[in-house]
Image (tube, rainbow, N blue to C red):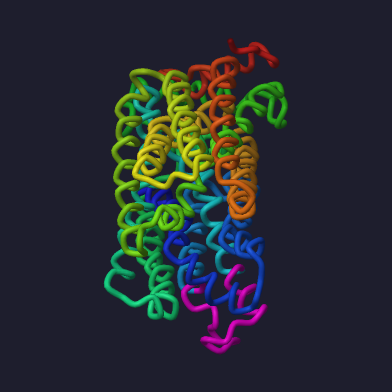
Amino acid sequence: MATLGGLLFGYDTAVISGAEKSIENYLINGLGLSSFIHGITTSSALIGCIIGGIIAGFFSSTFGRKKSLIVASILFLLSALGSAYPEFLFFEVGEPTIGLLLTFNFYRIIGGIGVGLASAIVPMYIGEIAPATIRGRLVSFNQFAIIFGMLVVYFVNWGIARGQSLDWINEMGWRFMFASEAIPALLFGVFLFFVPETPRYLALTNQESKALTILTKINGKNTASNILQDIKQSKSASKSKLFAYGKTVIVIGILLSVFQQFVGINVALYYAPRIFESMGAAKDASMLQTIVMGLVNVIFTIIAIITVDKLGRRPLLITGSIGMAVGMFGVAGLAFANIISIGTLIFIIIYTASFMMSWGPICWVLISEIFPNKIRGQAVAIAVAAQWAANYLVSSTYPMMMEYSGGMTYGIYGIVSVISALFVWKFVPETKGKTLEEMENMWNNSKETKIS
C-alpha cells in the first residue's frame, strides 16, 4: 500500500511524456514563447518536488509518516484534475493566455509537492518498518512501483493516442492523460487508512506500546523487544542536530541524490517519445517504443530487488554506473556521427537498464538506511530536495543543450556516470544486513569516518 506512493511518483513525473508536445502546441507555440519556457513548463512539477522534498522532514517529524503520505495523496488528486482542466472557473478553453500557462504550471507544481513528499517519506516508511534482512528488497519495491507507474502511464498515454488524429490529441487527448492519475491517487489515499504508523516514529514520540505491537507483528516477540530497546537508546542520545554525527553522512546522502539525477535518467524518461520521434518513428510508434523501454525498466528493477540483499548495495551501484556510461557514450557517438538507427534505441535501453538495476532503486535504499534515527527526517528531506533540484536542472536545460549539440549532451551524462562509479568506490559504505541502529553506531563512533 505504501508503495502506491511510488507508483504515483512515477505516474506523475512520466505523464508529461505523452502530453508535452500537445502542451507545447497549445500553450507555448500558441503564445509564441521560447524553447526555454517549454523546458520550464515540461519540468515545472520538479519545482514542487523540490518544495515537497524540503518540507518532507518537517511533515514526517511533526505529523508522522502516515499522515504526511495522506497529504501527498490529496495533492496528487488535485494536480491530476487541475492539470487536465486548467481553464476551470477562470479561462476559456482553446484560448491560451499567460494566466492559463501559469495556472497549468501551478497544478503541476501541486502534484510535484506530492511527489516530493512521497519520494522522501515512502522509502523512509518502508525502511523504518522493514526487518533488516529484507529491508533492501522492500525499499527497492518502491523503485519498482515508480517504474511500474511510469510503464502504466506509457500504456495509458499510448492507449489514449492510438488511432486518434493529432488534432484530437492536441485538443482533448492530453487532458485524459493527466486526468487518469486521479484513479491511483484516490486509491492511495483510501488505502493509507489501513496501514500503521512506523514503530520508530511511534517510539520517538513516546508511543512505545504501539511501537512494540507493530514490531512484534513484523519481527516476533523476542526480536521486537531487542529492536525497541535499541530504538529507545537511540532516542535517548543527545545528538539531534543535523551535523551531530558529522558532515560525512550528510554529504554522502546529498551526493548520492545528485549523482542519481546528473547521470541524465529523467531526460530519457520525460522526453522518451520525442527522442524516438527524432529517430524517425511516427507518434504512435514512438509511444510504443517508450512502452518497450518501460518493460525493460521493470525487468531490470526486479533484478535489483532480487539481488540487493544478496550482492549488496555497492557492487550494484558500480556495475550500473559502468553500464550507464557505455549506453550514454554509445548514444553520444551515434549523435556526433549523425547516425539515427536501431543502435540508438539499443544504447538507450542499455543505459536505462543499467540505471534500473542500480542507481534507480539502490539510491533510495541507501537514503532510507544511512541516516541515524534522530536526524533521519531532516537528513532525508535535504537529500531528496537536492535530488529534485538536480533533476530540475538536468530536465529544464535538456532542450537548450540539445539545440547546441546532442552528442555533447549525452557525452556529459556518460562522463558523470563514470564519476558516480568512482564516488561509490571511494566513499559509500556497505549497509547490507545492518539494522538502522547499527548504521547509527557506525557514524556515532567516528564523526568524520572515511569509507574506503
In the rendered structure, which segment of residues is drawn in magenta?
A: 82-105
- Residue nearest the viewer, comparing 113 with 242: 113
Figure quadrant of residue 182: bottom left
- Residue nearest the viewer, comparing 310 with 391: 391
- Expressed as whole percent of the image width and height from the top left, the position of residue 374 reads 62, 31
Where does the C terminus fall, quadrant-wise?
A: top right
- Expressed as whole percent of the image width and height from the top left, the position of residue 73 reads 46, 59
Query: Does 100 appear in magenta?
Result: yes
- Expressed as whole percent of the image width and height from the top left, the position of residue 121 reads 51, 44
Q: Is residue 58 visible in this depiction of the protein? A: no
Query: Does 145 appear in magenta?
Result: no
* Residue 12 vertical placement versus 425 (above, below): below
Q: Residue furthest bottom?
A: 92
Q: Is residue 269 visible in this depiction of the protein? A: yes
- Residue nearest the viewer, comparing 52 with 441: 52
Residue plotted at (64% across, 50% down): 404
* Residue 262 vertical placement versus 165 (above, below): above
* Residue 401 vertical placement versus 38 (above, below): above
